[in-house]
Amino acid sequence: MKAILALEDGRHFVGEAFGATGEQSGEICFNTSMTGYQEILTDPSYRGQIVTMTYPLIGNYGVNDIDTESNCPHVKGFVIEELCEEPSNWRSESSLQSYLKNNNIIGIQGIDTRSLTKHLRERGAMKALLTTENISPEEACSRATKSDGVVGMDFVQEVTTEKPYRWDPDNTLSREWVLANPTTKPEEKNGKDYYKSLTEIKYQIVAYDFGIKKNILRCLRREGFSVDVVNARTSAEDVLSMNPDGVFLSNGPGDPEALGDIHAEIKSLLGKIPVFGICLGHQVLAHAIGGKTYKLKFGHRGGNQPVKDLRTNAVAITSQNHGFAVDADSLPASAEVTHLNLNDGTVEGLRSNDHPTFSVQYHPEASPGPNDAKYFFSEFAKLIGDSK
Amino acid sequence: MPKDTSIKKILLIGSGPIVIGQGCEFDYSGVQACKALKEEGYKVVLVNSNPATIMTDPEFADRTYIEPVTPEIVEKIIERENPDALLPTLGGQTGLNTAMDLVRKGVLDKYNVKLIGANAEAIEKGEDRLAFKEAMIKIGMDLPQSGVARSMSDALTIEEEIAEKTGKRFPLIIRPAYTLGGSGGGIAYNSEEFETIVNRGLDMSPVTEVLVEESLLGWKEFEMEVMRDRKDNCVVICSIENLDPMGVHTGDSITVAPAQTLTDKEYQIMRDASFAVIREIGVETGGSNIQFSMCPKTGRMIVIEMNPRVSRSSALASKATGFPIAKIAAKLAVGYTLDELPNDITRETPACFEPTIDYCVVKTPRFTFEKFPSADPTLTTQMKSVGEAMSIGRTFKEAMQKALRSLETGRFGLGADGKDIPKSNAEELLSKIAVPNAERIFYLREAFKNGMTVDELFGMTGIDPWFLRQLQQICEAEEKIASNENDLTIRKAKKLGFSDRQIAHLKGETELQIREKRKNEGVIPTYRLVDTCAAEFEAFTPYYYSTYGDENETRETNKKQVMILGGGPNRIGQGIEFDYCCVHAAFALKELGFETIMVNSNPETVSTDYDTSDKLYFEPLTFEDVLNIFEAEKPWGTIVQFGGQTPLNLAADLESNGVAVIGTSPKNIELAEDRKYFSALLDELGLKQADAGTATSEEEAIEIAQKIGYPVLVRPSFVLGGRAMVIVYNDQELSSYMRSAVEASPERPILVDRFLEDATEIDVDVISDGEISVVGAIMEHIEQAGIHSGDSACVIPPFSISDKIKEEISTASKALAKKLQVKGLMNIQFAVKNEELFVIEVNPRASRTVPFASKTIGVPLAKLAAKVMVGEKLTDLGFTKEITPDHHAVKEAVFPFVKFPGTDIVLGPEMKATGEVMGIDSDLGMAYAKSQMAASCPLPLGGNIFISLKDRDKDKAKEIIKDYHELGFKLFSTEGTAKAIKDEGIPVTKLFKLAEQRRPNVLDMIKNGEIDFVINTTSGDRNPRADEVTIRSSAIANGIPVMTSLSAAKASSMAIRSLKTMDLKVKTLQEFHIG
């Protein structure tokens, strides 16, 4: 079936639909990761967005139950060059097209994703419409123009948990998945899968769920944190009443500036308890300490972004997914920029000199992407330990 | 971290001659390293014996030694140069082994030279099987069950242990330590094979050590190209997945970048493992290649090996991503860190990142089994391919089909091109699928067409179903194109990689009709940038591939453009020498202010470095693909005479479609191949040639042969490298040849020449600007006429011919250049017999000897030729007189026999050499001695020599035999030759002939290491006696030098005398050419 991808600036692409049919609008952005489409689809930070993959061959290894970052895909649409309908991987449980269909996500293939990417690089991220309806491209473009964008949008309320919950109380979800290895014999086996054993719980923390990725929760638990996940609009008072050892601010979708009420709550946590933020959590924290964020032209989405740790000068290749960034000039003197993106010099990490608080713009939990920055989870543990 | 300023002078070791397993990728990496280090202000001292490399051009290093790459010679260079550091990781296994020898001998300590890039401990750990295994266990890696054997009894014990642990005895893999491209290794399926391969492996390993291990046959195979800097920043440049599963050497596998069938979790586990490996092995800076295998059913992942240096795969990864691994490795070695170096392609982002690509890359190996009919064409863990082609497409299907037509094996995609293999019977088909071979991919197509399923083929081949399904989709599309199904438009077919030729074949039309049709429909290729970043950033380097997308990324230019057509994948007869010429053309024309466009499909080369030309098109060298580029770029001129036969074969069609070929006209190049025209031309110029005729049938050939007299040299017209060229001695041999040769080249007639036995062969390279012609060099062959010029050793200046003949050669060469209106280079082969000069053949194009001649005389002939082609005059360029150097230079050919055990090493008119070396010295004997050393066949200074001569040689050999006796050799021989030697009053020990079945015979002595040198001239028949072949091939397998002609034996005695009477001295090319 024919599908149209229409952009608000009048450009359109005609391709073939796969997955669900219908019509969806959202902000279109591109991701340069060559692997990890399943993680990307299920990352709540993509709420409201139509994602295109720059790597042209997608679906090769299918879809499985383990490589998910939330309970369902969040993208508004998925745009690729060539779909692999018959995946090949020993872990594959279903094909990409049936996964999207079952989750009611529209996919489009057979379009020139490099042309699209170049267009977005030059013109910036923009509103787009993905439709399988029998309408003219012009009509599709005009519908794209009329759709809501992401600036000023609060997608967090759509993805945050309604009720607080304790993450993985049975210790079954957080173990690190590893490959079979008869030479070193991994500790635990479950069906065909092998896992590393979990460490003991050392600290109790509260995680604000702005659209949290499961792998962040897994990484926190592996580091010895027991995590209580709470709604994005939980008051500082309520959080403190839970008497946690620390507070974590999660990743999430949309414009950080639109979350003014949350900024205020976080601000009142500062100094009272160690705080660690990732991605949207980092941006919210920046606002809480008096800084500002701005929209990047086309964002950072991929698994090859070099980030320099200014304290050690070491470079990590990082997994990123953000369309907004913290404005370094807006930060108060009490905040220190700890990490910079080597491609464009944007702020990638912050630390407060007054409070036990730090944050990173990128994704130390990886998934998808490199594991180079995993050390932040143990830094958080150390921060809590030091502040006791 | 800034660069290391305590270092001023750096020694770089090149990889020597092109051999199987070590190709021109190390020229590419060496050139990048030289440039990078010079750019930083270091003095670069280079040693490499291969004259056909760009790196040995005098401008790339400060001090260039074209000397043998052996520890002894490199020590002399160190003594003379006193470098501060040695960079061992850019010269392949040869560079690494030589550096390690120098470490072990204490040479580096003695002269206070430090190893940079990788230290000795890391190299040892990465290369030594046992140390590597221990390191892998330490970092928690899974490993195949295995053990290291230093003897057969060790090996048998290990075999039993593995069987106990895995519950399976065979197959087992045997890998000898420290050999190139896995030489001497293999897979044993039974205990008999096991013993044979273990024996061979122990023999060939310089440390007598083999690894016996659990077979991972059929597992998936991956490679990771990793870089690390001294601050421990690690990045993966490229992941590669092999289409052929474990069991086929990665150099012989079809490989794909990036990895296709790994989830992100699996990929990241492999990435983390790669870093753990490079850290544990301790490679401080630079690139390493780490190979993994993965069980397709359980995901068990095993590190197979790592190379603590740049490799063939890193060259491929560089070309596949645009990230210059060798250049960056050189900069990291002198102290920089990745974040301090810019990404050349995007300029604004740093080199500290991981390239992400938005296309698919396929590499296909190029084989030449037709040259070695007795070699086993089964693909195993020992590398057998001699070259490779790479292609880029937006999808695997597109890239795969482009790769197959890039191979230049006459195919235009995955079959459906009118050249399909004849339908095989079911049994044959199954065996061609189950047993890896060079054509397996085409048999897979046939299997799909016969209705076999992906599952069935996966079961038989272990090729991942993902790849199989992709191939099947190509086959399905083929059916649709053939049946004119509406939904398979031309545009769709092109997106699937179908060539016009395939579509034309399927639709029963001509290629040009299809071309016309699709152009009318607006279906023209779009050129896309290889930009390291999937379009996230703007790219500045114009490195293109074609695909059928929405947008074209080519850039308009105001400058005059010249397109240079490269030589495609390396093969025997067309290798690095032609790439050398293409690179020179690019450099020369850049100097003149032209914009150059390079077209090539060979990832190993310097020509496909994005730095070499102004624009690079990584494309197949077919009529369709080249004409497409022409139509997109509209270059002012196109050079076809530098890339060997590949571009010449396209020249006429390109010209008739509007391409302006510059230099000698393709028509004249073709005329020189036209027997009738050429004979008339020689008559007109008063030049002689051996009696000859042209035959189109067997009867005609015999008639001609009888008229001109046997022996005759027969060959099809229009071939390079003497393909299918043989000398026949009687009607019977001729008949049998005619039946096979007509198949070799159907549209062209067969040439029959009188064979000038025992004549001296001369090669001449001439340059002409249309007004004057200058002889570049006259080269005298050591081997007599009849041995292919590419296989023959040759010498500048000539050493035995008279001044009169030299004068005649010079005059004749210039007359021929004038007559053929040569603008550029021309190569002529002459034979001299009894003071008479015969023209053997003329090729009005760049030849294989151009780099050797250029380096000997100190004049860049290819550069001058390129300038002449755009209208410059030799007078203005300052080259008007032939140069006769004071020194002597010997070019020696290097052969792959050791990779094809049991193959006869006797040379003939069909070229078999993969590479060449050069020996240069003020003494001819010493120059020859150096050439033999460089070719890894150092001449012995004494010891036991085995001599066996054909009857006709016995008389002529007297002087030579005496010489060896006087040099102190102890002579051994079999009956006939022994008698001839005894008759001269020279002591000789008679040995039993192999056929006599009595011991000890010469084979025993060879195997026991009791023979140091063999002179064995062939009986001359097309079918040599089996025992001769056995003697020669076992001598080669045991590393004993073998001379198969009297002339070579004579040159060797002269060389041995020089070695015994004078000091071997080393000297730079720069010093030789000071004046």
Image (spheres, rainbow, N blue to C red):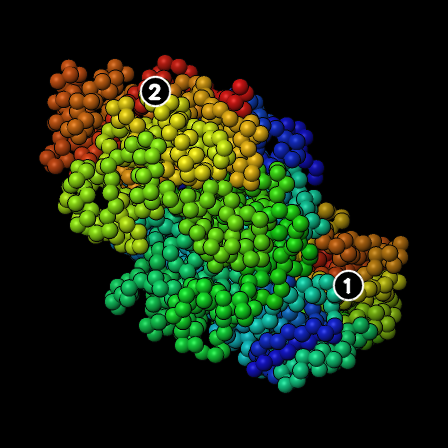
Is residue B555 shown left or right of residue B326? Answer: right
Nearer to me, B240 or B124: B240
Q: Is residue B500 above or below residue B342?
A: below
Specify the subunit that label 1 lies on: A
Image location of residue A249, percent across then percent down: 76, 67
Image location of residue B213, percent across then percent down: 37, 51
Q: Which residue is mark 1?
A: A296
Image location of residue B38, percent across then percent down: 62, 33
Q: Quadrant of residue B781?
A: top left
Q: Is residue B338 visible?
A: yes
Type of residue at label 1? Leu
Looking at the rendered image, the disc whose residue lies closer to the viewer, 1 or 2, is 2
- Which residue of the protein is positioned furthest toward the front in this rendering? B684
Q: Quadrant of residue B766?
A: top left
Q: Residue at x 45, y 50 (%)?
A: B651
Q: Which residue is mark 2?
A: B804
